[in-house]
Amino acid sequence: MSDPINPPQDCQLCPRLADFRRQQQDKYPDWYNAPVHGFGALDAAVAIVGLAPGLKGANRTGRPFTGDFAGDLLFKMMLKHGWARGEYRARTDDGLVLDKARIINAVRCLPPQNKPNPDEIKNCRPFLARDLTQMKNIKVYFTLGQIAHHTLLDMLGLKRRDYPFRHHGEWQLDQGQMIISSYHCSRYNTQTGRLTEDMFDQIFCRINAIIDHP
Ligand code: SF4
């Protein structure tokens, strides 16, 4: 039976990404090298929208943000703020459970240089939409980086000029949910000081204030 939410493991909708996937399969046959599905409870209050799998992170392990620097920071924060239970050991069998959040990437396949092109983002958007539609208790959409933010806006039919991306942007939607935007927790952003751990931490505090005391 076909999966109602996720693309097939050999999805060919983006020829460039499918070709790049085949290259990684040849190069790293022991890696995951396939579209990466969402991770976290479907009844979670926070829907985290990321960009795309990282080469040595989700593309290697098969779980969003698992195995690279961005994940180290994201999962550290999620554990600190009570969104996750267990221990994060950068592997899919670490037993980590996400209760309050679910992570879905805007683009599910590894893009060269971490840069999906507009057609690829558009091709993958229905899978993001299907995943988010399954989440019936969303209180906050938490967007990591501009591409994820714009993809969510496009998916929700919202105008980008009305919700301009910035770090710690906050918008209330008519349907009751909020969008909170953040710089992506990438190694580049943290090493250049664009995003400090403290800045990221403050966003988690703010989101907890929203979901615990709406
Ligand atoms: S990015 Fe999405 S739409 Fe494109 S090939 Fe991968 S799974 Fe399919």
Image (tube, rainbow, N blue to C red):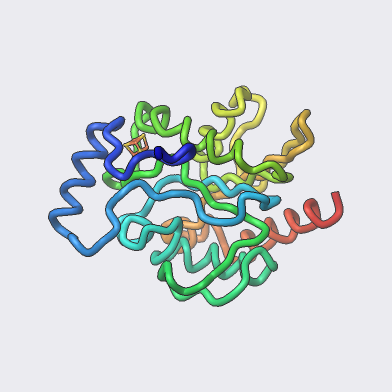
Give x and y (percent) for residue 66.
43, 63
| View quadrant of ligand 1 | top left
Give x and y (percent) for residue 141.
65, 43
Extreme residue in the right direction: 213
Q: Is residue 92 above or below residue 43?
A: below
Q: Is residue 175 above or below residue 167?
A: above
Left or right of 212 on screen, residue 195 = left
Extreme residue in the front direction: 1
Q: How many marks?
A: 0
Left or right of 114 on screen, residue 77 = right
Extreme residue in the left direction: 26
Q: Residue at x 27, y 45 (%)?
A: 112
Give x and y (percent) for residue 189.
47, 56
Left or right of 189 on screen, residue 177 = right
Q: Residue at x 30, y 30 (%)?
A: 13
User: For the N terminus, which image quadrant?
Assistant: top left
